Amino acid sequence: MLIPAKIALGLSATIVMSTAYVFHEGLISVDVDEHRDGGSHIHFWVPATAVNAALQVAPRRHLREAAAHARPFLPAFREMAKELKKYPNAELVDVRDANTHVRVAIVDGKIQIDAVDSGETVHVRVPVDTLIDVADQLEDEAPSI
């Protein structure tokens, strides 16, 4: 009876540690709701660690091509992402009119984009650390001048 208990404990500890590692960078979430008959409702969550993993297995030629296109903007993107880390809770943009509301903010270390229109609602949340990781990876792949 002692051996199965040790195996179960080992498996449980492995699952807990794997889950903690996968979710240590947080979650990326995308929620889209169309407010009409037959409208779509999409709710998508993915661990932010998956972005790093995807960048590691993405074909190098595609990553280099994307980095080449983004090269002029990479230094600004990287600095912006690093600066956003200094403000864990800040409102960046808040625009309203009669039918539309768009808000961009940093909430608990995540960039949060909320767009509400009379016909649909979109919410996107991405950890700032993920933006820094993407900027670093693209800079590593960008062709030198």
Image (spheres, rainbow, N blue to C red):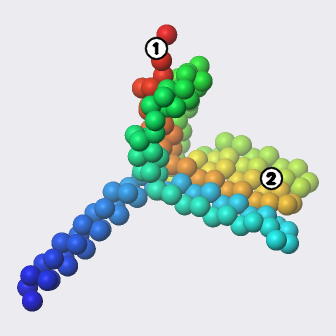
Q: Residue furthest right?
A: 98
The image shows residue 139, relative to residue 42, as above or below, that is: above
Quadrant housing residue 34? bottom right
In this view, 76 is above or below 38: above
Q: CA distance from mark 2 to mark 1?
A: 41 Å
The reply to whether dot 2 and dot 1 touch (C-beta < 8 Å) is no
Label 1 amino acid? Ser
Q: Nearer the viewer, mark 2 or mark 1?
A: 1
The image position of residue 54, as x and y in percent, is 45, 45
Q: Which numbered disc covers residue 144?
A: 1
Q: In this rendering, would 52 be left or right of 75?
A: left
Q: Which residue is mark 2?
A: 101
Q: Can residue 124 be seen by looking at this rendering?
A: yes
Q: Which mark is residue 125?
A: none
Q: Is residue 6 left or right of residue 55?
A: left
**Rendering coords of residue 94 (x, y %):** 75, 47
- The structure residue drawn at horizontal position 80% and vertical position 60%, both measured from the top left corner, is 120
Q: Position of residue 56 (x, y in %)?
A: 40, 40
Look at 42% across and 26% down and name the residue there: 140
Confirm whether residue 132 shows in the render.
no
Residue 18 or residue 87, whichever sits in front: 18
Label 1 crowd (10 A; few <14 / some 14-19 / many >=20): few
Residue at the extreme left of the image, as rendered? 2
- Please report the residue visible at 51 percent of the width from the left and 57 percent of the height from the top: 46
| Mark before the other along the chain sequence, 2 or 1 | 2
